[in-house]
Image (spheres, helix red, strand yellow):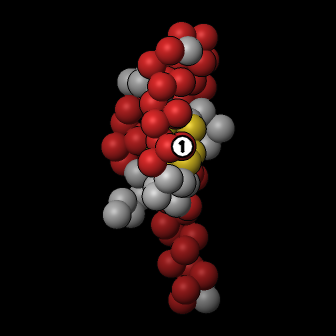
Amino acid sequence: FEGFGMPVLEAMACGTPVAVSNIPALAEVAGRAGLCVSPLDVNIWANTLRRIGQDEDWRRSAAEAGMAEARRFTWNETARLTAAAYRRAFHV
């Protein structure tokens, strides 16, 4: 169980195409750049991994999209969103 998806984010920032379980935290991080699949469907995972291994065009496109998607997550944005959450929680 991954709480945010830091490994996915780090992989994308390095230009590594990603496939992730379609749970909300991982799907949010992968965005449109990754392949999001059911965590329980072995056949879908097998087909997804086959595609990743065989589709060079997709890998190249996913690597570029992943690096762009990863740029959305900065420490400044994290701090801004965290402060906003605290303000909402405490009605400040």
Residue at image location 52% in from the left, 33% down from the top: 47
**Front residue of 37 and 81:** 37
Residue 43 percent coordinates (x, y): 50, 44
Q: Quadrant of residue 8?
A: top left
Q: Is residue 64 above or below residue 23?
A: above
**Front residue of 2 and 49:** 49
Q: Residue furthest top?
A: 56
Residue 19 percent coordinates (x, y): 48, 38
Q: Residue furthest bottom?
A: 90
Q: Is residue 36 visible?
A: yes
Residue at image location 51% in from the left, 78% down from the top: 86
**Front residue of 10 and 55:** 55
Residue at image location 50% in from the left, 15% down from the top: 54
Residue at image location 37% in from the left, 36% down from the top: 10
Amino acid found under the numbered disc labelled 1: Ile
Would you name the residue on which mark 1 appears?
44
Q: Is residue 64 visible?
A: no
Q: Is residue 33 above or below residue 4?
A: above
Quarter of the image with the N terminus in it: bottom left
Residue 14 percent coordinates (x, y): 39, 24
Q: Is residue 11 above or below residue 87?
A: above
Q: Is residue 77 above or below residue 23?
A: above
User: Crowdedness of circle 1 by 10 Å Cα count: few (<14), some, many (20+)?
Assistant: few
Quarter of the image with the C terminus in it: bottom right
Disc 1 on helix, strand or loop? helix
Residue 48 percent coordinates (x, y): 52, 34
